[in-house]
Structure formats: C-alpha cells, structure tokens
Amino acid sequence: MKLDILAIGAHPDDVELGCGGTIAKEVSNGKKVGIIDLTRGELGTRGTAETRAIEANNAAKILGVAVRVNMGFADGFFVNDKEHQLEIIKMIRRYQPDIVLCNAFDDRHIDHGKGSKLVSDACFLSGLIKIETNDGEKTQNPWRPKQVYHYIQWKNLEPDLTVDVSGFIDKKMASVQAYKTQFYDGSSKEPETPISSKNFTDSIVYRARDLGRLVNVEHAEGFTVERHVVVDSLFDIK
C-alpha cells in the first residue's frame, strides 16, 4: 500500500498531539495517511501498553488513517543503530510515503529526539540501492521520501512552516482524548504526570490558536525542517 504521508511517533499519542490536525485535514483532502508508533509506551506512568494499544486504534479511526503499525521497540531504551534503522527502512519501503512526519528534534522526553534522528536517518538510508531489505519473501525497492517534517511537541520551538488546520481542531482533540488513560480526567485515581493536567489539555488548543493568530488563521500546527523549503512562486505563500 502506497501512502502519501507516513506519520511516525516514539509513543502512541505523539502523532495526535503533534500533527493530528494536519493528518485530519489531509485525509479530508483525499490523501492516504498512515501512522507508525515506535514503542508501545510501556513505561508510561498511567495506563498500560495494552490500554495504549486500544486507545491508539480508536484514535486512528477518528483521524481516518489507512494503517497504523506499532514497531514494538523498547520504550525509553531504543537506540538509533543499524538494527532499528533497518526496521524503519522496511516500513518506508513498504509504504513509499512522499512525506514523513516525525518527532521534534529536541524535546523534554528523550525518546522524542532519539526517534526524530532514527527516522530521519532511516529516510535517507532507505534510498540507497545497496541496502537490501525484504518484506516477507519479497525484495524491497529503494525509496526515499521527498520531505521529512518534524512536528513540534512539548518545547515551544520556532516553526519553519505552518499548516492551517482551521476546522480540524475538534477532530484533533477527539483523537487526543481517545487516550483516556493519559490525559486529564478529574475522576482518575492514577498518578498525575506533566501531560495529565487540565492545563496541558487546554494548551493543545490555545497553542494551535496562538500559532494561528501569528499566521492569520484560526488554528495552525507548526513543523521544523532539515532543509530549505522550496515553492514555485512567491504567490504560493499565504
């Protein structure tokens, strides 16, 4: 199955938080989008790997993505080495995305930066013809995505580009709130975490609104890039 966009996150819920509005918008535009979670989030303070899997599946249905895969890497302990790179290369070659969205370069959780570099390196290596991989018994062809964009997470990084997600913030929030064990629930008896407060849940919307204010739209999501963004004409920029 060829995808237009492959969104990759270190943990289930990273993609929803970072670029759920962008995904919802592109799906509505007829684009085929997939999600890969690198880990099961098994070290998370709240919930379990099993509940996270159910929540991730529910969030995927809300966003309307074509496929969601969990790589089962070790939460907190996966590394950017050949073994892990080859597993991501296989996924890139399987789905042949034109665009890859992945974790922030630098963030509060150590897995986010590691996941960012792992995916970025794998996207480059996936285009090298002398790296041989197989999908089952089928030999895979090289494939390098045209663009790799990094969504913004906990840290308030300055975006290199923004996507107008006006009209899609409700769907983004519905996908986030599918993770019932992770985010604000006044009746929950589980330990509090930096992302379980009402302030954090509210911040998802007001950050999108504030970025939207800066670019003259209602809501927006920001991304950073590894190389310069090119447009055909100055008139392509809103």
Image: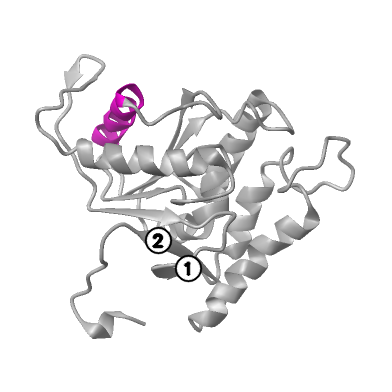
Q: Which residue is drawn at 79% across and 56% down?
A: 198
The CA span between labels 2 and 1 is 8 Å
Residue 107 lies, with reference to residue 168, above or below; the image says above
Residue 179 lies, with reference to residue 91, above or below; the image says below
- Residue sitting nearer the eye, 148 or 110: 110
Is 161 within the magenta? Answer: no
Q: Are marks 2 and 1 in contact (CB under 8 Å)?
A: yes
Horizontal placement of 91 versus 217: left or right?
left
| Residue 220 % position (x, y) | 51, 70
Name the outermost residue toward the top. 137
Circle 1: residue type: Glu
Q: Which residue is drawn at 51% across and 47% down?
A: 15
Circle 2: residue type: Thr
Quarter that holds the N terminus: top left
Horizontal placement of 176 versus 129: left or right?
right
Q: Mark 1 points at which residue?
A: 158
Q: Can residue 61 be seen here? A: no
Q: How crowded is mark 2: few (under 14 residues within 10 Å), some or many (20 or more)?
A: some
Residue 234 lies, with reference to residue 91, above or below; the image says below
Quarter that holds the C terminus: bottom left
Q: Over which residues does the magenta segment extend?
A: 82-95
Q: Can residue 158 be seen here? A: yes
Q: Name the residue under label 2.
A: 224
| Residue 85 % position (x, y) | 31, 29
Q: Quick one: label 2 or label 1, which is nearer the N terminus?
A: 1
The colour scheme applied to this rendered structure is one colour
Q: Main secondary structure of the magenta part?
A: helix
- Residue sitting nearer the eye, 86 or 60: 86
- Residue sitting nearer the eye, 117 or 91: 117
Horizontal placement of 88 versus 134: left or right?
right
Q: Which residue is drawn at 87% across and 48% down?
A: 186
